[in-house]
Amino acid sequence: MTLRQGYKKQGEHNPVMTQRFGADPYALVYEGRVYLYMTGDTFIRDENGEVMENVYSQIDRINVISSEDLVNWTDHGTVYAAGANGAAPWGKNSWAPAAACKEIDGVMKFFLYFANGGNGIAVLEADSPTGPFTDRLVKPLISRQTPACSDVTWLFDPAVLVDDDGEAYLYFGGGIPNADMAANPGTARVVQLGGDMQSLRGTPVVIADVPYLFEDSGINKINGRYYYSYCSNFSIPEEQVSSLGFDKGEILVMTSTNPMGPFELVGPILKNPGWFFGLEGNNHHCMFQFMDQWYMAYHTRILEERMGILQNYRSTSIDSVQIDGNGRISSIQATREGVAQTQPFYPYCKHKAVTMAAMGGITTTQYGEDAVKYGSGEMLLTGISDGSWIQLCGVDFGEKMVQCLEMTVRGTQGGCVKAYLDSPHGTCLCETALIPGDTQEFTVCKGIVNRRLNGIHDLYFVFQGEGYEVYDWRFV
């Protein structure tokens, strides 16, 4: 059986997701997991079905995935954020999300901020990091009627910080008002948020003297100092690159002892993706700490390149960040290999079938009333045909006598799933026959292993047949 095409080579962990695109990543760390929220780039096609250039005007959804090891990622679907069927139907677009959580009146709440194109910032609320997200304000949090915001060229790209004392701050803005202002556009803003995370405490203020600002606000607190980061614009004169110490479309960092500034320039930390991969574009990032290590999430065009499409569709990657004892960030290297797995994957409990490190020939779809209505939440592995497959990395079988593989499936047609160690052509652990049944009812199907397994391996599920969907699996 011929395997369906995958888009990552063995040993590559970037991009983190290949079943969909996902740009402008923002990370939220909660209860031992990293949640990534990403602009939902989706193919635009002409009347002949040919993929057209991505111009962002139709984007109204936000993709969500999460991981506890930064290599195997669970697909949580797509938040229907804006547009007629979105949580905020007054908005047209949902670009560049930012996420935060905060305990309010004894209940942990999750907040998802996003840009309505270049003309304002929305905020959605949920009781879970995966939603369902709803719009309590039913209007923008930041608009051109907000004080000090009417003249911001691009009123977009939010970043949010909940400080150690519980106070929260929102950073946003970008663009160049005119060519004469390219060196100091003056379009970055910061404002303190109210205790509910959905109101403003005071008036937004200018983040002063941000050299060659373009877009992409970022904010972190490291060793008691506040790090404001952004993407430089594309109007830097070639003859000034050496003296400035940075180039076009790079991520730069400024620091302050106050979350509201003033901030002082430190310098560049991440070059444009074109420097690393030869595919230039805008540069959007989010720096985050997980298990005592710092990481950088950013987007590139390497997925569309592997697909044979060069139309500016973007996907998220993650690489390590090194910070010395003085808080100095070393230049970050963007790679296809990505980061090391932070911990082994445990196979003896139920895992959602939409958890994977790589895949070929599958898609995912919403499952359950809330997920279907709001877009994010429970998901199913679907779009399966002969040769479809998923990979899980660093699966730790320990040293145990394994009886069987259990898979929860539904569908009207039969098929089977083969489990392999280390390669889809490697040792076959078992073959699980899938019995056709009702399209709405799930059945637990078992494949006999009956052998002692030991050590850490990559695990592949290779599918045969079609017309069925998979909910979860476990070894017992």
Image (tube, helix red, strand yellow):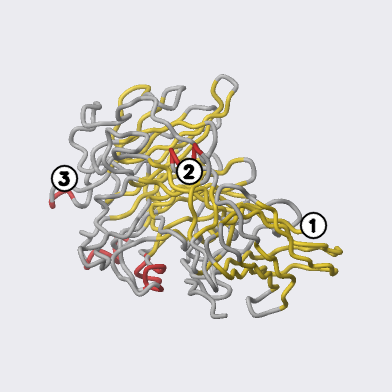
**Which residue is drawn at the image coordinates 52% and 48% (left, top)?**
76
- Rendered view: 311 above or below 154: below
Residue 132 on image: x %, y %: 48, 36
Report the amino acid beneath label 1.
Val
Contact between labelled residues 2 and 1, with CB atoms less than 8 Å apart: no
Task: Determine which of the numbered discs, if any, sits on residue 177 in the image.
Answer: 3
- Disc on the earlier residue, 2 or 3: 3
Spatial CA span between label 1 and label 2: 29 Å
Spatial CA span between label 2 and label 3: 37 Å
Task: Determine which of the numbered discs, if any, sits on residue 376 in the image.
Answer: 2
Mark 1 vs mark 2: give the one in front: 1
Report the amino acid beneath label 2.
Ser
Residue 143 appears left or right of 87: left
Q: Residues within 10 Å of mark 2 (few under 14, many from 20)?
A: many
Q: Residues within 10 Å of mark 1 (few under 14, many from 20)?
A: some
Task: Determine which of the numbered discs, if any, sits on residue 315 in the image.
Answer: none
